[in-house]
Amino acid sequence: MQNKKSLLQRMLVIYITFFVILAAGLAHSFLPNFSRGYNEGATMGGDIVRNWASGAPRQIFTLGEVSVTSQDTFVIKGLDSLSEVKITPTIQHINLTVDQPADSNVGAMSLAFSAIGGSAWIYLLTMLGSVAFLAIIVLMFIIIHSIRRSIKEERTLDSRNVWYIRTIGFLTIFTELSHALIAWCMATRAAELLAGSNLIVDTTFSISYYTIIMGILVIFTAEVFAIGQNLSEEQKLTI
């Protein structure tokens, strides 16, 4: 019995560490963009409402983290060009704020919901990604609490936790795919707006295979739990 309890304790440490690292990785890539986007969105929303109320509605939206290549360099104020240290800055990513006339019949809510990428469905997909991220965090806390309770009661996890872990895996993959799709749509729109300029927009569809692999590993973990639970139930029936 002592060996079984020791095994469950090691499982607790391993899985808590795994889920904490996964949550930290997602938070590191999500929270900075969320806080910056919230502040920019509040300012943009005020501008949209004021323009619409004045009778001259304008569509204002952002295109963020657009990958570009350029042969030109730009000047950074404050650098001493006569210094022995030569610094040559180049542009790799840009954030665009687009301000263009809108149809006079369009509503304020329609303009607000197109503030990201210039499209309501991109806005919706962004919100769904945010909700999925919050759901992952909540499910992680539920699972960690369940594992602690399982160790105290010296039993395996119930079937609900298997579904929770599976859900985390699928949501992790969904958040990455949605982020990649949004980035590709924004890059495509930016390429249209910047056509003829000295900037070349990278419109390739790229995803983080690291995050996808993490999601697959979480799903694999859920299947391991499911197999262990089935074996435990079969063992009880044979006794």
Image (tube, grey):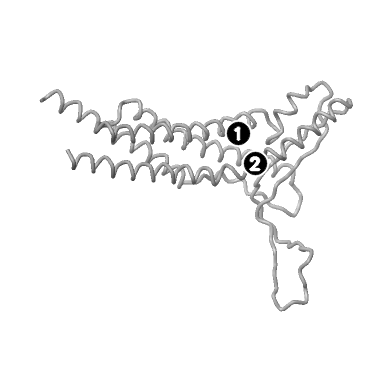
**Residue 225, image x, y percentages:** 29, 34
> From the viewer's perspective, is 168 left or right of 225?
right
For label 2, the residue is: 35
Q: Secondary structure at mark 1?
A: helix
**Residue 24, image x, y percentages:** 49, 45
Residue at horizontal 70 percent and vertical 43 percent from the top:
190
> From the viewer's perspective, is 219 left or right of 97?
left
Q: Quarter of the image containing the C terminus?
A: top left
- Which residue in the rendered view is the most extreme toward the left? 239
Measured along the vertical axis of the image, is residue 209 above or below residue 167?
below
Locate residue 112: give its quadrant: top right
* Labels 1 and 2: the sequence-earlier one: 2
Label 2 amino acid? Answer: Ser
Residue 126 badge? 1
Question: Closer to the observer: label 1 or label 2?
Answer: 2
Label 1 amino acid? Answer: Thr
Q: Secondary structure at mark 2?
A: helix
**Residue 50, image x, y percentages:** 84, 30
Residue 69 badge? none
Query: In front here: 49 or 5?
Result: 5
Residue at horizontal 46 percent and vertical 46 percent from the top:
209
Q: Residues within 10 Å of mark 1 (few under 14, many from 20)?
A: some
**Residue 62, image x, y percentages:** 71, 39
Q: Quarter of the image containing the N terminus?
A: top left
Q: Residues within 10 Å of mark 2 (few under 14, many from 20)?
A: few
